[in-house]
Amino acid sequence: MKLDRIMWGIILLFIGGVLLLENFGVINFYWWSVWRFWPIFLIIAGVNILFNRNKSQVGSIVSIAILLVTLGLLFFKGQEVPAHKKSASVEQRIDGGYDGDAERFEEQTFSQPYVDSLPVRTILNISGGGTSFDLKGHTDSLISASVRKRGGTFSLKNETMDSIRTLNFKMNGKGSWNVGDGGNSVDLMLNTAPVWEIHVNMGAGEVDFDLSAYKVREFSFDGGAAALDVKLGSTLPITDVKVKTGIADVKINIPAGSGCRIRAKTGLSSKEFTGFTKKADGTFETANYGTSTHKIFINLDGGLSSFEVKRY
């Protein structure tokens, strides 16, 4: 049997075993925690190419041994809870004795005034790789943002057409490879009066949004290697949620009084939908879905991710 087929078989067994253990509640595995070790797979691929060309039995054993050790490391690291939130500000790290490269950060601030005669729809498009986005509460402005960055340049553009106002908050250029304390971070504040449609698009990054106090008609997230933690409220009759990911750790919190339906196309992803019943058509629903005056529709599409939907 060819070496590459053996190695791919071991990798698939590892992924399947982790997903099975997680689904049975034996372990909590965070795929986001292991993503930062992705260069290891380049090393494994290189070793495989070298030894596979020589067709050496000893080389094959070495390749398999390296793979097993690597997967063991990833299994251990994957059970470490990722730090989605920044643990300290620059000032706190300096006061605590760490000021290693605080001077390498640059800051930007943005604000868009709130006008009473706002259009019917307010769309917020957010994009930026290697960035942590946190929603820090409400503001008297329509939107305000505070940016700390190592790379790239952020911009906020406002466009109004008919009854639609569109805000494009975008990072231009190359961002930082690090996420969290070592990379770009954005603290956002939004006004609670408008009806929001929020669309987030990123490669790698983190999003932590508590939207429970906001009128959110639609929330969508499209991310590669990302961590998403979003909390929704019941301020509108209908809220649509669309999440599409590659390798991600996704947590969605919804009100217990809201009826909810989930459509999931999750591939090798793990999913935990506490308080939901699986229907014959493959969807998941809460018991109060038919009677609730507020409904949340969730569509999940993920390759190798962890999806969790909880009621609060």
Image: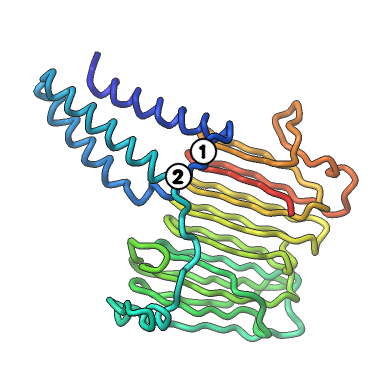
Q: Is residue 214 shown left or right of residue 41?
A: right
Q: Is residue 293 shown left or right of residue 195?
A: right
Q: Are marks 1 and 2 in contact (CB under 8 Å)?
A: yes
Q: Nearer the viewer, residue 218 or 87?
A: 87
Which residue is at a point 71% across and 34% down the rendered structure image? 283
Is disc 2 surrounded by few (<14), some (14 to 19) or many (20+) residues within 10 Å? some
**What kind of element bears circle 1?**
loop
Which residue is at a point 72% across and 63% down the rendered structure image? 216
Q: Is residue 18 shown left or right of residue 135?
A: left
Residue matched to label 2: 79
Where residue 124 appears, as percent x and y from the top left, is 60, 68
Q: How many marks?
A: 2
Q: Nearer the viewer, residue 25 or 259?
A: 25
In which quadrant is the C terminus drawn?
bottom right
Where 183 sits versus 115, above or below?
Answer: above
In which quadrant is the N terminus drawn?
top left
Q: Amino acid at mark 1?
A: Ile
Residue 19: numbered disc? none
Q: Is residue 42 shown left or right of residue 151?
A: left
Which residue is at a point 49% across and 60% down the rendered structure image? 84
Q: Quadrant of residue 44?
A: top left
Where residue 154 appears, as percent x and y from the top left, is 43, 75
Which residue is at a point 34% across and 65% down the rendered structure image? 176
Label 1 to label 2, Cα distance in Å? 7 Å
> Which of marks 2 and 1 precedes in the sequence?
1
Residue matched to label 1: 27
Q: Amino acid at mark 2?
A: Gln
Q: Quadrant of residue 161?
A: bottom right
